Image (cartoon, rainbow, N blue to C red):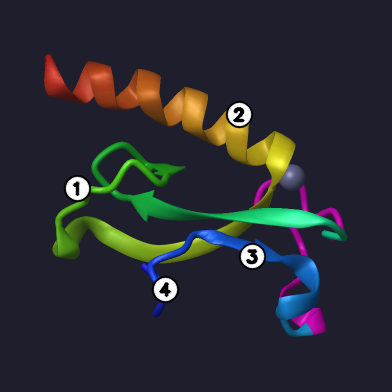
Amino acid sequence: MLADGSLERTATQLPPEERYCTCCHKALKGSLTWLEFDRRIDGYHDFGGVPVEESQGLFVFGKTCAKKQEDEARRKLNEWRFS
Ligand SMILES: [Zn+2]
């Protein structure tokens, strides 16, 4: 979680070398999303509740990729919970 608790940032607030989507490596121009890497499911999401020892920190994504990552993470988390 960032200092003010917000996971929303715009690309211009990032240093140039970090303005790339973690997923597709495209340059980010507009708004972007920070997702946390959850080692339990090997995936990214911002649902919270990741144990500190299982979190790899926050990574930046474009809107479209963030949604894809979260859909996948939601599915993986469901499998993880019931396994
Ligand atoms: Zn992407």
Reading the image, the residue beneath label 1 is 49
- In terms of sequence position, does the residue under pointer 1 or pointer 2 come before the other? 1
Choose mark 1 or mark 4, whichever is in front: 4
Question: Quick check: marks 2 and 3 in contact, CB under 8 Å?
Answer: no
Nearer-N-terminus badge (3/1): 3
Along the viewing direction, whichever of 75 and 5 lies nearer the viewer:
5
Q: Quadrant of residue 31?
A: bottom right
Residue 8 position by quadrant = bottom right
Q: Residue 42: give x, y in percent of width and height.
A: 37, 42
CB atoms at circles 4 and 3 under 8 Å apart? Answer: yes
Task: Look at the numbered disc 2 and give the secondary structure of its residue.
Answer: helix
Sequence-first disc among 1 and 4: 4
What residue would you read off at disc 3? 9
Give the amino acid type for the residue marked by disc 3 in the picture.
Arg
Residue of label 4: 2
Question: Which callout, 1 or 2, points to the residue nearer the camera?
Answer: 1
Circle 1 Cα neighbour tier, 10 Å, few/some/many (<14 / 14–19 / ≥20): few
Q: Nearer the viewer, mark 3 or mark 1?
A: 3
Which quadrant holds the N terminus?
A: bottom left
Residue wearing tag 2: 68
Q: Nearer the viewer, mark 2 or mark 4?
A: 4
> Compared with residue 39, is residue 68 higher up or lower down, i.e. above or below?
above
Q: Are marks 2 and 4 in contact (CB under 8 Å)?
A: no
The image quadrant that residue 43 belongs to is top left
Q: Earlier in the sequence, mark 4 or mark 3?
A: 4
